[in-house]
Image (cartoon, rainbow, N blue to C red):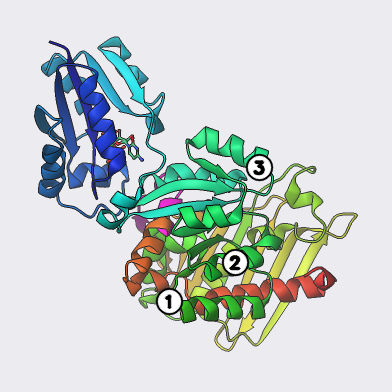
């Protein structure tokens, strides 16, 4: 008797799960299905699991493919289950290709092609809670987005659009999703849109996605003009759609803990915020060759302005930009100095100058410091006058961290308003205003 084993969360049970179990069963005579516990999903970083373990087991049972159902509680369990149940074949979807090759010494490992479209008309109604994501743009960040989205239950990355169809096809092949050349077909196939195209194209893509009734998550900087941001948020509101700017730091749990502690009064009244983020880029990179939309502030300004806006708000008395530029006038390093009625702030970013990336929040009783990469906040300290009284805080930051914004975006779509406070509409509008001001002062306003 050939024994096959597979594992999964099987949340919001859908066609992808069904087809996987069906093919797993067909590989042998006896199928064992491991269903993950909530605790295990938490440790492995899967967010937003909706159904209880009991419901998920019931759904697997209903398919009739499983001869035995077990629960999966830890990462080492696959190895011991294979021995314990004398398994011949381990199988899982192809989104895990290579990942479980270490089991090849103990049994055959088969990766079954993942199901691209889990939204046949029949299943749409049943699975109305599963949001189909369409990606616009195929750059580096889009490549990070797909595996992160797979860690969030309730979404399925359906396809990608890029006017350069060859780029779209290569991306789609890499991630086993659909490539779309035609925008209308793309919009018909998805419920939500993630925009990861060049900065200057964001406005038009957001506008068109909202007009097609799609919720939008757009990479930072969302837009480069205040009025554009206001228009887009008004349009989203009118249509009852969610529009979110994707600044990953804003949604990650460590940064929230940090803000909570900074605002709690433990360091007294906040008087100074200093945020710095530098990332050296190759001189031929898009960021350093695009004379209009490139440069350090458009690239990294959203990150460094985020803690400033979160802690001091947008009613600054003055703002000043000082930059170090290359021969073409592009900023390699920019320092933004802001004066507020009760404090001062500096936000520094660089692509061609390396500095210490640090977030420092100084108050009347003490200070909080998070070292680089504070924008992926996982550790920070609180210091007081008494140098020995240091408090240390840590929080998990999983993978590339995009899963947190995807999870919050999804819960906003599902009616939970909580996500919105992590990056408010007002903050995104203000960020667009700062981008606009910076570009105008740099003589780039003609290009909008
Ligand atoms: N699957 C698929 N097509 C989809 C979605 C999922 O074939 N569109 C497959 C996955 O590859 C997996 C199974 O369905 O083999 C269950 O998917 P999930 O519930 O998302 O579980 P997963 O997080 O992939 O866990 O120990 C757990 C395992 O590692 C798999």
Taking the image as shown, residue 138 lies to the left or right of residue 259, namely right
Task: Report if residue 72 lies within the magenta region.
Answer: no
Q: Estimate how packed mark 1 is, as few (under 14), some (14 to 19) or many (20 or more) residues with alpha carbons within 10 Å.
A: some
- Residue 381 versus residue 419: which sits nearer the camera? 419
Report whether 7 appears left or right of 388. Answer: left
Asked whether, in this view, residue 371 is left or right of residue 14, the answer is right
Q: Are marks 2 and 1 in contact (CB under 8 Å)?
A: no
Residue 206 rendering spot, x and y as whole percentages: 58, 66
Percent of width and height locating residue 414: 32, 66
Real-space CA distance between mark 2 and mark 3, rounded to the nearest whole angstrom: 19 Å
Which residue is the site of mark 3?
165
Q: Which residues are magenta?
A: 392-405
Which residue is at 17% across, 30% downward?
33
Above or below: residue 129 compared with residue 171 = below
Location of the C terminus by quadrant is bottom right
Q: Which residue is mark 1?
A: 240
Q: Which residue is mark 2?
A: 208
Q: Is residue 313 above or below residue 172?
A: below
Does label 2 or label 3 sit earlier along the sequence? 3
């Amino acid at each position: 008797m050939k024994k096959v084993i597979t594992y999964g969360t099987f949340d919001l049970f859908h066609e992808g799960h069904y087809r996987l179990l069906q093919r797993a069963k067909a590989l042998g005579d006896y199928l064992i299905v491991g269903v993950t516990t909530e605790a295990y999903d938490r440790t492995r970083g899967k967010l937003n699991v909706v159904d209880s373990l009991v419901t998920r087991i019931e759904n697997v049972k209903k398919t009739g493919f499983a001869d035995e159902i077990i629960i999966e509680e830890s990462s080492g369990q696959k190895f011991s289950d294979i021995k314990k149940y004398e398994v011949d074949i381990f199988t899982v979807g192809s989104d895990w290709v290579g990942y479980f090759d270490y089991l090849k010494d103990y049994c055959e490992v088969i990766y079954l092609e993942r199901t691209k479209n889990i939204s046949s008309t029949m299943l749409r109604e049943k699975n109305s809670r599963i949001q189909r994501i369409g990606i616009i743009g195929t750059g580096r960040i889009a490549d990070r987005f797909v595996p992160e989205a797979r860690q969030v239950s309730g979404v399925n990355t359906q396809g990608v659009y890029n006017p350069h169809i060859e780029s779209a096809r290569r991306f789609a092949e890499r991630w086993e999703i659909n490539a779309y050349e035609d925008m209308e077909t793309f919009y018909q196939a998805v419920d939500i849109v993630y925009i990861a195209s060049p900065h200057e194209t964001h406005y038009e893509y957001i506008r068109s996605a909202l007009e097609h009734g799609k919720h939008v998550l757009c990479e930072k900087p969302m837009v480069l003009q205040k009025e554009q941001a206001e228009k887009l948020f008004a349009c989203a509101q009118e249509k009852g759609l969610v529009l979110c700017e994707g600044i990953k730091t804003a949604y990650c749990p460590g940064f929230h803990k940090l803000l909570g502690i900074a605002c709690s009064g433990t360091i007294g009244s906040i008087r100074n915020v200093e945020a710095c983020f530098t990332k050296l880029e190759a001189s031929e990179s898009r960021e350093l060759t695009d004379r209009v939309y490139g440069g350090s502030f458009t690239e990294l300004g959203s990150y460094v302005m985020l803690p400033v806006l979160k802690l001091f708000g947008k009613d600054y008395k003055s703002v000043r930009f000082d930059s170090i530029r290359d021969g073409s006038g592009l900023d390699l390093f920019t320092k933004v100095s802001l004066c507020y009625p009760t404090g001062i702030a500096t936000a520094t970013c660089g692509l061609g100058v390396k500095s210490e990336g640090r977030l420092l929040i100084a108050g009347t009783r003490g200070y909080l410091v998070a070292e680089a990469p504070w924008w992926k906040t996982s550790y920070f300290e609180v210091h007081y006058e008494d140098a020995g009284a240091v408090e240390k805080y840590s929080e998990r930051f999983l993978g590339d961290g995009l899963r947190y914004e995807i999870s919050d975006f999804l819960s906003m779509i599902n009616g939970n308003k909580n996500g919105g406070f992590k990056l408010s509409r007002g903050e995104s509008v203000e960020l667009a205003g700062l981008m606009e001001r910076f570009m105008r002062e740099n003589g780039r306003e003609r290009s909008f």
